[in-house]
Image: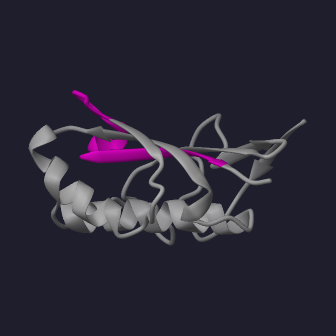
């Protein structure tokens, strides 16, 4: 049975999607962009600041289901500019320990609200 996970500490959905859903031990978190949860506005700053906000949003939704980054088994990173990868990877890496989750990273032409970055995660809890 699919169940919705919602955190007031992360940006609220603005469309027909959930912040995250669980199915059994699996946790699927929708892509997060650098929105400030309290205002719904895009955070200003460089890609490091934006990535930090995205990771904080992900953390809030994980914690709403009593999970942490240690439960994450797969991530997907979407970047408007692949030249930002090294900076994004540096910030991203601070949130994970070995064994690191599997990951994909792709360059895209557009993201919601003209964001420069979006990250989605899949986690597992036994």
The vertical placement of 61 against 104, above or below, is below
Q: Is there any visible trace of residue 116 in the rendered image?
A: yes
> Residue reaching furthest right?
1
**Quadrant including the N terminus:** top right
Question: What kind of colouring is applied to the model shown?
Answer: one colour
Q: Is residue 93 left or right of residue 76?
A: left
Q: Is there any visible trace of residue 10 in the rendered image?
A: no
Q: Which residues are magenta?
A: 105-123
Tell me if residue 33 is in the magenta stretch: no
Q: Is residue 77 left or right of residue 32?
A: left
> Residue reaching furthest front?
99
Q: Quadrant of residue 26?
A: top right
Identify which residue is drawn at 74% across, 62% down. 65
Residue 73 % position (x, y): 56, 46
| Towards the viewer: 112 or 23 | 23
Q: How many marks?
A: 0
Residue 9 % position (x, y): 59, 71
The vertical placement of 5 against 95, above or below, is above
| Towards the viewer: 95 or 5 | 95
Q: Is residue 60 left or right of residue 27?
A: left
Q: Is residue 37 left or right of residue 113?
A: right
Residue 56 % position (x, y): 46, 68
| Towards the viewer: 103 or 38 | 103
Tell me if residue 113 is in the magenta stretch: yes
> Residue reaching furthest left?
83
Identify which residue is drawn at 63% across, 62% down. 62
Residue 36 % position (x, y): 42, 67
Identify which residue is drawn at 42% across, 63% down. 55
Q: Quadrant of residue 89?
A: bottom left
The vertical placement of 113 against 51, above or below, is above
């Amino acid at each position: 049975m699919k169940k919705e996970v919602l955190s007031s500490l992360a940006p609220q959905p603005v469309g027909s999607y959930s912040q995250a859903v669980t199915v059994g031990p699996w946790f699927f978190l929708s892509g997060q962009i650098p929105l400030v949860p309290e205002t719904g506005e895009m955070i200003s700053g460089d890609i490091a600041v934006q990535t930090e906000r995205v990771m904080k949003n992900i953390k809030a939704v994980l914690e709403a289901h009593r999970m942490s980054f240690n439960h994450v088994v797969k991530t997907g990173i979407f970047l408007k500019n692949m030249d930002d990868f090294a900076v994004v990877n540096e910030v991203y890496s601070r949130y994970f320990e070995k064994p690191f989750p599997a990951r994909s990273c792709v360059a895209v032409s557009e993201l919601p609200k003209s964001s420069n970055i979006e990250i989605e995660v899949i986690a597992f809890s036994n």
